[in-house]
Each structure stands twice: as structure tokens, then as C-alpha cells.
Image: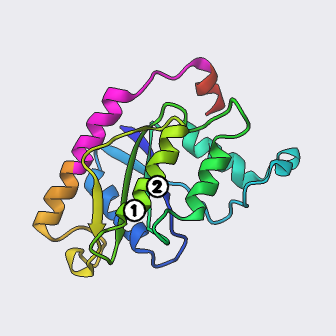
Amino acid sequence: MKQVAVLVGSLRKDSINRKFAEALGKLAAGRLEFRFVELGDVPMYNDDLFENLPASITRLKNDIASADAVLFVSPEYNRSFPAVLKNAIDWGTRPYGQNSFATKPGGLVGTSPGAAGGAAGQNHLKSVLNVVDVVLMGQPEVYFQYKPELFADDGSVKDEATKAFLEAYISRFVQWIERTSEPKTSAQADAA
């Protein structure tokens, strides 16, 4: 089973994007294994920290490098994506030549209470992910308007139309990972 490093762009305990990611993970069970990457303890990017690299950075880079794919789950802040994701991307791509994201199949989803579902923020994030060599799945796009009544108390999706839509996304993401995965070199396997 393919392992997916999941980066959620909200640190809030009761984040709807975290809940949304967990619901997707339940739908993907048996096809993909979601592994949530901790971002809350990652310091802001600073080259000087490479002299005595914090354990959180090593963990972040290893979590991404060892995964078969990455899934970004992003809220929208001021028509863009949150700094916590940009920070994780900056650390993950450094130092030069050690890009943990390179050639990883990737997906991008997000949710918001508003009708646009975070579309503007995702569009900004897409441009960054392409630059850092994430092989991003373009379709279907998931700009999801979060409504609590669509989900059961255990976090699973209870609305059948929503479930069908999100299962179609997961199925397509599984196919995308299979189609775009590059074999790991021995050096990449050793780094993971």
C-alpha cells in the first residue's frame, strides 16, 4: 500500500482542514495509508539552523522523503495559502540538492466554510508546488465548502453525494500515484 505524507496547512486543534484530511484518510483506507506530518514544531526557515539542525526538520524531511506521495490540505488565508505550508516546503527543499519533494506525486485539496472552498489559496500553492518538482495532479480539483452536517460524529463522510465525490478524488489520486511514481534510487532509499 502506498504511503502518503499529508501536510495540513492549519495548526488549529479544531481545524476543519484537519478534519477534512482525516475524512479523506478514512475513505482511502485499504488503498492509501495517510501519514500526517507534524508542522507545529517546525521553526521558521533560517539557513543558520543547518549548523545545528533541529530534530523537527530532520523528521519533516524524512517523513516526506520516505512517502510515496504527498497530499497538501490547505485552508485559504487572505486569498493565499498559509505560511506553515510555505515554511514546510522551504525546509523540505533545502539544502540545495536535497529536495525531499522532488518527483513526488502530489495532490492538493482544501476546504473552507465559504462557497469558493479555498480556490484562490490553492491556485497560489499550485505555482509553488510545480517549482519544487511535486508532480501535481491537476484534476479533479477539490475546493470543498465545509458543512459539519456532511460528516458523522466519528469524522467519516455520511452524505452520499459528498462521499461519491471524494471517493472519486481518492481513486484518481491512487491512479495518479501509480502512473507518476519514479523508482527510488539506492541513494533515495538510504536517505529515507
> Residue at horizontal 60%, vertical 37%?
100
C-alpha gap between disc 2 and disc 1: 7 Å
Question: Are circles 2 and 1 on residues that touch, CB within 8 Å?
Answer: yes
> Residue at horizontal 59%, vertical 18%?
186
**The quadrant where residue 76 appears:** bottom left
Label 1: few (<14), some or many (≥20) within 10 Å? some
Residue range in magenta is 169-186
Label 2 belongs to which residue?
A: 124
**Which residue reaches farthest top?**
186
Q: Position of residue 148 (x, y in %)?
A: 27, 80
> Residue at horizontal 30%, vertical 51%?
29
Indicate the amino acid at tag 2.
His
173 in the magenta segment: yes
161 in the magenta segment: no
The dot on residue 120 is 1
Q: Position of residue 6 (x, y in %)?
A: 46, 53
Magenta region's main secondary structure?
Answer: helix
Q: Position of residue 38 (x, y in %)?
A: 58, 59
Label 2: few (<14), some or many (≥20) within 10 Å? some
Relative vertical location of residue 65 with respect to residue 112 in this rendering, above or below? above
User: How many numbered discs, if any?
Assistant: 2
Relative vertical location of residue 60 with respect to residue 116 in this rendering, above or below? above
**The quadrant where residue 19 appears:** bottom left
Q: Which of the image's four quarters has the C terminus?
A: top right
Tell me the SS state at disc 2. Answer: helix
- Left or right: where 131 falls relative to 95: left
Tell me the SS state at disc 1. Answer: helix
Relative vertical location of residue 13 with respect to residue 33 in this rendering, above or below? below
Indicate the amino acid at tag 1.
Ala
> Residue at horizontal 41%, vertical 68%?
17
